[in-house]
Image: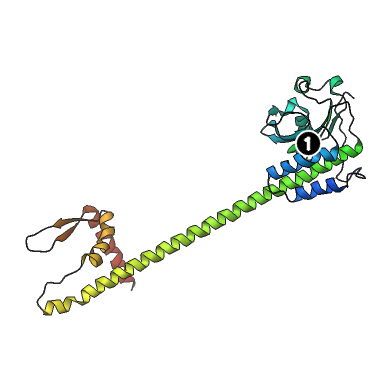
Amino acid sequence: MDVLDGRRFSWFGAMATPFQEPFLSAIQALSFARSVDDVTRVLRTQARSIIGADGITFVLRDAGQCYYVDEDAIAPLWKGRRLPLESCISGWVMLYGPPAVVPAISVASRIAHDAYRPTFVRSLAMVPVRTEAPIAAIGAYWASVHEASETELASLQSLANAASLALANAQLYADLQGAIASERQARESAETASRLKERKISFNLKKLCELQQAFDKFPQQKREGRQPVFNVPPLYPILYRPEAQGAIAGRWVDRAGQRRHRFYKLTATGRKKLVQQRQAWSGFKLAL
């Protein structure tokens, strides 16, 4: 036969013998596939024995090319190679949809003979993975002249259909895992932010309490004629933030016989903020 065969097969077409243990085992394994690698592994390890071929290839459609992902054959074929869609039978099947059967490559006029000459392949059958807008193809190869039977083609196409569902499920699984990971990351980020906020609030409350205690001692210190003393820990941290924002500027002053003091003054930025805050406070009082 010199032309590519355009025969189509339904999922259960001509399936009298394929429903045997190896075939059912492969279908079950594909149903559990969670990634492209899982699908590839099932096809590589089981498809060849089911079809009774000398070689099997699994080809993905990738950006206008045929990517020969994996193979199981009596001798090396094209694993890892990328070829233009228009230059090979797997690309023809993915472009146009129907299966292709070539019983004798040596006399086929539309075959790229240079690609097959170094291999054992003398005949082949190729089926699409997904009949509408195929995303991949599965090829079966024989080392002798051989026209694939209806049963062999039906088995190959059924494996391709199961692989199509498996690939779709793998994509859904990957999307689901990605959504779960994103949700988990968002939740962890929110929890971390909440913990940091609680710590900051706790720290500020602690410093305010220490400052309040210092102010509570002020009348007693004044009555006793002592200079009010505010410890650095409660007072200075309150000034750290406006200093970091450039609203105030501070400097340490050392004087003989006295404790070290730190003096602050408003900067130009601080004076602007003070005007803004006074205006806001005036508006607040008027609203009350």
**Can residue 216 be seen?**
yes
Whether residue 70 is situated above or below residue 114 in the rendered picture: below
Q: Quadrant of residue 98?
A: top right
Please state the horizontal and vertical placement of residue 263, each as a whole percent of the image: 16, 59
Residue at point 29% right, 58% down?
A: 241
Q: Secondary structure at mark 1?
A: strand
Please state the horizontal and vertical placement of residue 30, each as a whole percent of the image: 76, 47
Please state the horizontal and vertical placement of residue 3, each as a whole percent of the image: 87, 25
Residue extending furthest toward the left: 256
- Quadrant, the N terminus: top right
Residue at point 76% right, 21% down?
A: 118
Please state the horizontal and vertical placement of residue 187, each as a whole percent of the image: 52, 60
**Can residue 156 be seen?**
no
Badge 1 amino acid: Ile
Q: Which residue is mark 1?
A: 138
Residue extending furthest toward the front: 74
How would you rate the neighbour count of disc 1 (Cα within 10 Å): few for under 14, some for 14-19, many for 20 or more?
Answer: many
In the image, 23 versus 102, the foreground residue is 23
